[in-house]
Image (cartoon, rainbow, N blue to C red):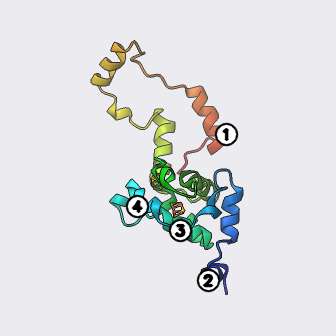
Amino acid sequence: MDEAKTAANTHVPSSSFAKEIEAEPGGEDIAKCIQCGMCTASCMVASVTDKYRPRKLIQMILLGLREEVLSSDLPWLCMTCRMCEERCQEDVNLAEIFHAVREIAAREGHIPPAFKNAIDVVLKDGWMLEDAYSDFIEDDRDDLGLDTELSWNKKFVAKLKKKYFKGESTK
Ligand code: SF4
Ligand code: SF4
């Protein structure tokens, strides 16, 4: 019997994937979850899509569904608003746990296309919303005494690309 089925049958939250997440920075609290569901009831992402259920995602990790979790877009849907953490009676740090999951997923090449595109846009334009930089914002910046010309530090970006993307597009 595989590990997920064994864990599901015995209800023991001690899969090797849960231990792997526990060992990753941010994932330390995962075994504290008692599956009460308060996080899902508090989550604004869960309130707009049935697809996303933080309690269930934690459960999948506890049960050892490694490939299913890492290849899924779900851990990337957390907005890190931390409302769930405010209400979790066990002090489970869900946003950090999902960061830890994303770290492992990214290392193994599982990054949803929308996030890869976002990285490419930032590396190319310097920020996500270049097109949204309007005269209105320029006037606001001027009023606040800020530089109205946004400059892009090409040297810094080159270093960043070299360190994290080997100078290539993330695509
Ligand atoms: S609120 Fe906390 S204890 Fe309850 S299911 Fe969510 S993470 Fe687990
Ligand atoms: S931190 Fe993530 S899981 Fe928690 S309420 Fe916010 S979006 Fe939902």
Q: Considering the numbered disc 1 on the image, is that residue within a helix, a strand or a loop? A: helix
Of the residues under marks 3 and 1, which one precedes in the sequence? 3
Q: Tell me what residue is drawn at x 55 percent, y 55 percent.
A: 94
The residue to which callout 4 is attached is: 41
Q: What whole-number distance in Å separates the C-alpha atoms at marks 4 and 3? A: 12 Å
Q: How many marks?
A: 4
- Disc 2 C-beta below 8 A from ligand 1: no
- Position of residue 160 measured from the top left corner of the image (x, y, whole percent): 62, 36
Q: Amino acid at mark 1?
A: Lys
Q: Is residue 151 left or right of residue 63?
A: left
In the picture, the quarter occupied by the N terminus is bottom right
Q: Can residue 73 be seen by looking at this rendering?
A: no
Quadrant for residue 131, please give it: top left
Q: Amino acid at mark 4?
A: Ala
- Position of residue 60 measured from the top left corner of the image (x, y, whole percent): 56, 70
Of the residues under marks 1 and 2, which one precedes in the sequence? 2
The residue to which callout 1 is attached is: 163
Q: Can residue 152 be seen by looking at this rendering?
A: yes
Q: What whole-number distance in Å separates the C-alpha atoms at marks 1 and 2? A: 40 Å
Give the answer, above or below, for where 69 lies relative to 133: below
73 or 56, which lies in front? 56
Q: Is residue 129 left or right of residue 64?
A: left
Q: Amino acid at mark 3?
A: Gln
Q: Tell me what residue is drawn at x 62 percent, y 44 percent.
A: 165
Badge 1: residue crowd in 10 Å (few <14, some 14–19, many ≥20): few
Q: What whole-number distance in Å separates the C-alpha atoms at marks 2 and 3? A: 18 Å
- Position of residue 115 measured from the top left corner of the image (x, y, whole percent): 48, 50
The residue to which callout 2 is attached is: 5
Q: What whole-number distance in Å separates the C-alpha atoms at marks 2 and 4? A: 27 Å
- Position of residue 100 measured from the top left corner of the image (x, y, whole percent): 62, 54
- Disc 1 C-beta below 8 A from ligand 2: no
The residue to which callout 3 is attached is: 35
